[in-house]
Amino acid sequence: MSRHDAYREEVMGRANVGDTPERVAYYQELERFDTAALWTVANKIEPWEPRSESVPVVWRYQDLREHVLRSIDLVTPEEAGRRVIYLNNPGRREVAAAVGWLYSGLQVMRPGEAASAHRHSACALRFIMEGRGAYTIVDGHKMTLGANDFVLTPNGTWHEHGVSADGTPCIWQDGLDIPLVNALEAGFYQVHPELRQAVTHPVDDATLTWGNAALLPAGDAWSKPYSPLLKYEWAPTYEALQRHARATEGSPFDGVLMNYINPATGGAVMPTIGASMQMLRPGEHTKAHRQVGSFLYQVAKGSGHSIINGKRYDWSERDIFCVPSWAFHEHVNGSATDDACLFCFHDLPVMRALKLYREEALADNGGHQPIIA
Ligand code: GTQ
């Protein structure tokens, strides 16, 4: 704490009560009645600004891949429910979060395997890392999935995943708001009575219907609280970034950043989780800012590094890294000739709905963080 904050804490009504034997005895007495004196915790429970318990982490695909693949021979999807190695932030182990209140895991499936259909209160998404033949079925809509495709399984929808018999082993990232839903004590979970659901629409109909940029189907009203475009394919996403880059300088903090949206509303893809893809142009080094919200990035293309709270984290294709709430961060594309693309999902829809969102640019040092060794 700076001297300035310490001064304010003493003078401007922050708790500043030293222990005496009488006070300590008093606190023990209060404990017997399931109570406590606010001034013993006030400064902790009402910090000046967000103090994340999450630490920045890079999960390197190169390190994880072989361990994820090993699980294929160790457990079946039937035994496991879902064969997933989840990302366990050292500061968030108790709630199984990768960062803040967000969960992330790497799910692996062999050709011909399928996981049982289920639904839950948590919102979920997948971002495909490798393999051919993966599919997800959401409320009867089947989606075929390739590398860097992004697919939604919104809360309350029946969903199941598998890999077709003529495919290859597939690995994808699962992103969910399980820790948030648990924190709110709002989670329900159901297995489908038949363990499988019928495909009741043409394959990939959601993308064929709702995925046509500025053209929406006439007369197809949509009132559900999530995007009807359940799958966002990589090729048009990358093309959109390149096209937009021809017409914009981009954001000083994020390069060319585009949000995946619900085409029916223009809003976030799901009630609690938003997602974006950003392109860092060759050699681009963004300026630092910080935001209220937790962010999980997956490197869709290229390599580089990010500086998060003054420390450098190197990343390359398929690595996943997190930026905790209110952590200063800036991104650097390591290549002078190729662009780099970062997929990201976050809890900004929650922060915005609760009117908690804030952001701040780093004012000092030309907008760049000094690197702490
Ligand atoms: O498929 O919805 O990685 O419920 C963890 C929990 C995936 C899923 C996970 C889940 C899912």
Image (cartoon, rainbow, N blue to C red):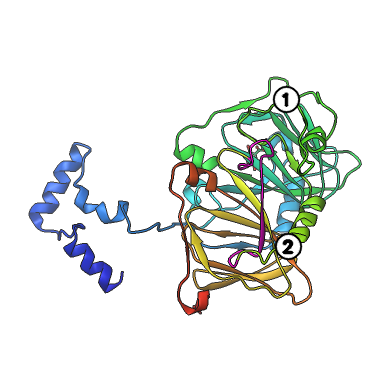
Give the tally of numbered discs.
2
Q: Amino acid at mark 1?
A: Leu
Task: Compare marks 1 and 2 and give the one earlier in the sequence.
Answer: 1
In the picture, which quadrant includes the N terminus? bottom left
Residue at position x 75%, y 77% in the image: 336
CA gap, disc 1 and disc 2: 48 Å
Q: Residues within 10 Å of mark 2 (few under 14, many from 20)?
A: few
Magenta stretch encompasses residue 264: yes
Q: Is residue 371 visible?
A: no
Judging by the rendered image, the residue that carries numbered circle 1 is: 195
Label 1 CA crowd tier, 10 Å (few <14, some 14–19, many 20+): few
Residue 80 is inside the magenta segment: no
Image location of residue 91, percent across then percent down: 47, 57
Magenta-colored span: 252-269
Whether residue 319 sits left or right of residue 325 in the image: it is: right
Residue 309 image point, x, y percent: 49, 69
Secondary structure beneath dot 2 equals loop
Residue 86: % across, % down: 62, 49
Residue for badge 2: 247
Q: Nearer the viewer, residue 41 or 193?
A: 41
Q: Is residue 147 left or right of residue 226?
A: right
Residue 334 numbered mark, or none: none
Asked where in the image residue 189 lies, by quadrant, the reply is top right
